[in-house]
Amino acid sequence: MIKKSQMINSLINDKHNTFFHRNCPGSSRTRVLMDGVVEIAWFCPSGRDDDKFTDRVAFCNLHGDAGEHEKQMHIMTKMSSVNIVVLPQLSRDDKRMTKIQNLYKDPKPLICLLPEDDLALTEMGNRKYKIGLKGRGQADVSEDLRRAITNCLPSASTFRLEDVSKHSDIRVDEEDDDDDCKKGKEAAQQMISLLEKKDLTEIKESFLPHQGKLWHQWCEKNKELNRPQGDDPDMEISKKKVEMKKIREQQHKAPISEFINLFIKQMNLHAENKSTTKPMFFLKWLRILLDEYTSADLSGLHHKYDKTWAEVSKLSKSSSSNKSKELLPKQKELVDLSKKLQDATFGLEHIMREIGQIYESCSSVKKNKKDLQFDFSSLPSLAAEMMISGFPLELMDGDAAHVPVIWISAVLDQLIQKLGDQRIFVLSVLGIQSSGKSTMLNAMFGLQFAVSAGRCTRGAFMQLVRVSDEIKTQMNIDYILVVDTEGLRALELAGTSTRHHDNELATFVIGLGNLTLVNIFGENPSEMQDILQIVVQAFMRMKEVRLTPSCVFVHQNVSDVTAREKNMDGRRRLQEKLDEMTKLAAEDEVSDAECFSDVIAFDVQNDVVYFAQLWEGSPPMAPSNPSYCENIQDLKTTILSHLQNALEIAAYRKLETEYGKWTWSLRKAMLEIENKLQNQIENAAINEVEETDLQGKLNENIIRETQRKLNVVLQQRVLKKKIDAQRTQNENALFEKAKNLALTLKNKAKDDKILQREKREEYYGIFQKYCQGATSAAIIGEIICNKLKEPIQQSVYKNTARDLADEMKTNCESLNGNRSNLEKHILKRLAEKEDFEAYKTYIHNPKEHFRSFIRDEVSQYIKDKFNISVLPKMKDDLNQKENQIKEAVKKATKDVAENSGDTDLWLKIFTLNLSDVLIFSEKDLEGVSRDDVDVKLLAEVIRKELPTIISNVRKEFSTASFLRKLEYKDRTDEILNEHFCQCCWAQCPFCRAICTHTAEDHDPQPHSVPFHRPDGLNGCHYRGTQTLTPDFCTTLVASTKRFYRSHESDETIPYKDYKSAGGVYAEWSITPDLTELSYWKWFVCRFQKELENYYEKKFQDEGEIPDEWRIHSKEDAIESLDKYF
């Protein structure tokens, strides 16, 4: 028997079960979940002759017996345009008969399906039909039903799904949530009402003035700025910047439309309420209503464009004698239609683009717009909230082919503020227009990139995708940032777009992404040639700038993805084509790459994915292909494997940043171990230092450095050994003489003055005690305490200096980063003091200036923080030393008692326990008589005398003593100097900028620096003149200018080919870059006279300082350091 749902399915799509029914795989005999459920599905005509219906039809299907679900039946029959009832034979007293009679009396069309009748379609009058089902085939019944519905549609009422909410018995979620959805719709409708009766092609010009001609002019100037021509690039750049500034000022004067002000007001309203769901309703409704508003006009324009394009193509192939005459007006019409299409395309992205340009114009002139009701600095926060809510944001303006860097940077800063510094994987997609890129991303991540024919992506969009907790744990990332791009070889751009545009786009998105999906439509590699060459060239450029993105090729619309042999052959042909394109691209990029694997790591077996066709049949009513979903899952798996690789690469890139932290941690460990080993050497506990003593504690470089230092200490110990031994012997002999003399004079002279005259003051105390009859234990105890004072002082000062270096490395702003951060603070300090002599040292002897700066920072820190930081550290360490000495006394006394030892054993254990902590050993007590010494009494004497020694040491703590008592190598500034200054100090041969590599020897990597300076700072001038050059190296290497490799040489070398000069020039990597620091422009203008006097030359004639440089203030200069360092 034909089922109701099965019959409706045949009307919608006879190849797909739109509605689930009893005969579907996996179904059951009884309804468990579906009884009483109403489902809805739409039929959309394609415009072809074989369409079942010529208009859109919505089918509402009630599962189960309608007689048992009165509420559903009432609503459905009231709202429907046509009622269809499967009607079994009923007796007159059946309560359901009344409902059928009511339907029959209703003026709406009614179609009755009679399971127990075999008659064909029969009209009963007044738009009432009956169709028998008994013994009839499904095809015949479906055709009768289709004809009946078609007959009823012209006079049927229109169905609106949203009218369901008007029924009081039905709860609609759009009406809940404090009317958020309704309010969002009302706000969106208010905005749309402002567009009514406006010509769609003129809306942007009147409502979005900031992204029109002025923005496009600024973009053109900016592109010219980055491609300077001629012999005076810096002067040309300066003029362009002045022109760009004027354009920004004009842009700032442009009015803000009521439409945009209303949008900002709505978004700020939600932001103030800290709502995350409310702006989503408003934005979704606005997008729906904008699409609805523009779709009709866009559809008409697309139809005209396609028709004209077909005519142009036909004329191009024509051999008519009037071909040129007929073709020209059609081509012009095509260009006009292309412009109208661009003007008529109006969506949420254009609103956000306008807000971005309002922000950029305000940022440029540094003041708010008069008609802007909110501070412009709040605008990036709105865009960040949109991204967090799941909306894409335009990354590159597709109409201007430009990235609004100021705006995008501000939005990303806000994202970081709102989300924290999250771990992000960037996935880019690139492909020919209409090849299914956006559809693939939407299916894979549940995104909402524009995919309709009238709204293909222009430019590039980015969207945040939060990953699952499982992936977050496995892959150590928090978000995937998906970047979708406009199609390459876009038809609308024909005539205005060039291969150059596609190259720029490909280079941009490949450079952004950790992984790029290269989307190819079809299987023929010869048709992919253009896109493959563009992709290969872009990857070559990545290699030049030391970026290592990955790529996966996705073949869309492949007929048989399961044929392994066919796929293998396709992979082989793709590899051959990639290698061929690599050779072609290598000629343009001056590269020696011969195959694609020379450019990037690429595995043709794992990095190529084949996709089945999305639809099974012809849209719009074709069902999706299950194989496509499987292919999406396979691609996800491939992406995750690349994600793991990208994380490893990202970790490697972070090494440079982390290296400074690690080396400081290692250096701290080195200083502690070095201190212990040095104490052991001085105490003769060890006689040689091997690498094995240090391995496992320090890295290789620091091992060698520490070993070298300690071996120097060993050599010094050998040299000092004889002197120290003699000194100790003499001192101890004096102690013995003091004892003997005291015994001799004990009964003869008790006058202190006589005793002081007999012996040096140094030994007076001990001598006095002997005279007073003190025991040997008391005398030796005091000798030990006196001898401990200096080692305690040395250790306390040394440890405090090391701890202070660690504290400053954390708390001192100038020292808490890498060397680049230190240099930024040095440059800030120089600007604040405006001391030209200090600048000269920095430029010509940077290492000495760095050391001097660190020395001053340490000195000032000690002065400012002595009582709150330095002194407490010294006191804490001193207390620790006291406790360590007491513990050593306790252990020595205990071990001697347990082993029935003597004084010698006690001294050996005591000094051994302190050998790591203090430079104090048994040899310090050589020559001192140990006869008749009670070790228990000795321990008691030391415990009694030690606090006095500790107190005396504490009293001497001061700023002066801290610096005076330390050896030079142990000083805090020297510890920090050793950390920061063991790096590369090579200077640019043109401008003297310092190489920023943290390793002293970084061969084979060339010297490099992020920002160069004007060459005039180094005294560079035009030969045979007194004219200094103000040009930056990074603009010179993009110019046609030439230079002499040395003062003696007569040969000139093009700056573009500077490495050919050999020597130091060949050791540097200087890439064209127009990101010139305001800092050096300000410096040249501020110290122009000083520079001219110092070098005895002038900034004049062709070396004249550009006017634009003179607008940079000291504040701008310092701000530029924070921006770029």
Image: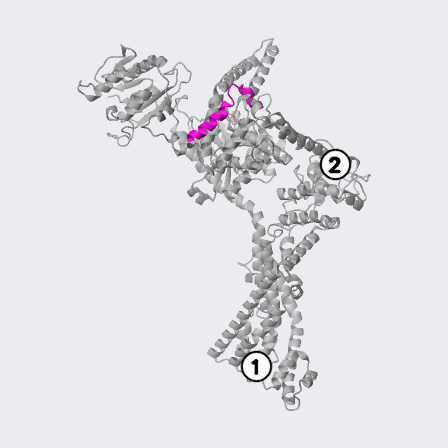
Question: Quick check: 434 left or right of 1125?
Answer: left
Q: Position of residue 106 (x, y in %)?
A: 28, 16
Given the current orientation, which residue lies at the most extreme top position? 321
Given the current orientation, which residue lies at the most extreme bottom position? 747
Q: Main secondary structure of the magenta part?
A: helix
Residue 469: quarter of image: top left
Q: Nearer the viewer, residue 111 or 680?
A: 111
Label 1 packing within 10 angstroms: few (<14), some (14-19), many (20+): many
Q: Is residue 889 magenta?
A: no
First in sequence: mark 2 or mark 1? 1
The amino acid marked with disc number 2 is: Arg
Give above or below for 164 relative to 128. below
For the record, the magenta segment spans: 181-205
Disc 2, SS: strand
Quarter of the image where the N terminus is located:
top left
Residue 962: quarter of image: bottom right
Disc 1, SS: helix
Report how far apart the C-alphas of labels 2 and 1 lie in the structure. Answer: 85 Å
The amino acid marked with disc number 1 is: Ala
Q: Nearer the viewer, residue 925 or 116?
A: 116
Which label sits on residue 778?
Answer: 1
Which label sits on residue 1042?
Answer: 2
Q: Residue at x 66, y 78 (%)?
A: 762
Which label sits on residue 108?
Answer: none
